[in-house]
Amino acid sequence: MAIFRLNCIDPKNGKNTVLIYDSAASTLKYEDGQYAVEPLPKEERKKPREFQRTQLGEKNVKQHGIRFLRIVLGTKCNYKCAYCSQAFDAPEEQVTSIADVDTFMSRLDEWLTGEPKRIELWGGEPLVYIKFLRKMLPRLRAKFPNSQITTITNGSLLTDEIVDFLVKYKVLFSISHDAYGQSIRGEDILDDPEKVKIIDRAERLVNKINSPTRSFTFNTTLNKKVIDPIRAREFFVKKFGRDIVVSTDPVLAVGRAEIDKDTIPSGEQLSELAQNVATAAMLHPDMSAYSLFRYERNFINALRNQIPLDAVG
């Protein structure tokens, strides 16, 4: 919790303006105490989320009526991304069996009640586990017909047949790709015209599932090789010859100095990244990274509803 003094430029007159941001109270004011973002009347504010908090040594009583279900298929992946934290934590050898699907599905009712709002399928690389998915997805969709099922893939294993399978069971999937900095992750699948065709078709089919909402995105990690969200989006627009939704997030430290040094922007590059993100955040999301628009919108909504910092989670 802290109070920040923000030196800004007023776009109306170009003059320097100071804003005071209180992260604990979630307020943004001018120096004279007037609100820069006016909060809603108390009776109209969104109620903050409540978190079950536990102290060290306390037993956490789990909730069975969950909104979000995350299914980790495994940690195997066919890529070796330089900044992947999961790679260091993954066991060297995993023993799994297709029979695990039967065990998992048969015990679901022990772990949760009702239908989750969203089900996330995680890897590793989820499509490494396509045999598991072929057995699990039909049963998962039959059990939870209204749940949103999502996953993120590096796209290297996508085929037209796999695209059709995922779309059949209404799986909203996106592709993790670092645009013009893809070399930090490995092979660039978008250098292959046939793979571009498959992904182009996938984008159109996935977006039809929740139309008019565009659910398919390219997820780009901002790192030492890619520090400009606008240029990243332009990369995909050029590859596909049309508008493409892009989401960007910064690489997080994996806790190994030699890796962090080579992947996390620092010094002048970090300043350039900050300037690029600030510029991109002022653009319409169709001209920039959608995630920046989402963060900006969530920040403004938090100020309007005065969501306290301890309700962020």
Image (cartoon, rainbow, N blue to C red):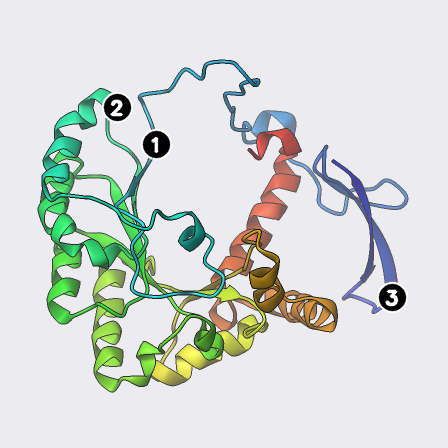
Q: Earlier in the sequence, mark 2 or mark 1?
A: 1
Amino acid at dot 3? Lys
| Residue 113 in sight | no
Residue placed under numbered mark 3 in the picture: 15
Residue extending furthest toward the front: 92
Q: Are marks 1 and 3 in contact (CB under 8 Å)?
A: no
Query: How far apart in space, not on screen, are marks 2 and 1 (Cα)?
Result: 13 Å
Residue placed under numbered mark 2 in the picture: 111
Amino acid at dot 1? Arg
Residue 258: percent from left, percent from top: 59, 62
Could you tell whether 307 is left or right of 168 in the image? right
Q: Which mark is residue 67?
A: 1
Report the front residue among 139 and 283: 139
Determine crowd level at label 1: few under 14, some 14-19, many 20+ residues with C-alpha closer than 10 A.
some
Amino acid at dot 2? Trp
Residue drawn at x 32%, y 84% is 191
Where 131 sits versus 105, above or below?
below
Where 104 sits versus 153, above or below?
above
Determine crowd level at label 3: few under 14, some 14-19, many 20+ residues with C-alpha closer than 10 A.
few
Does dot 3 land on a helix, a strand or a loop?
A: loop
Residue 269: percent from left, percent from top: 69, 72
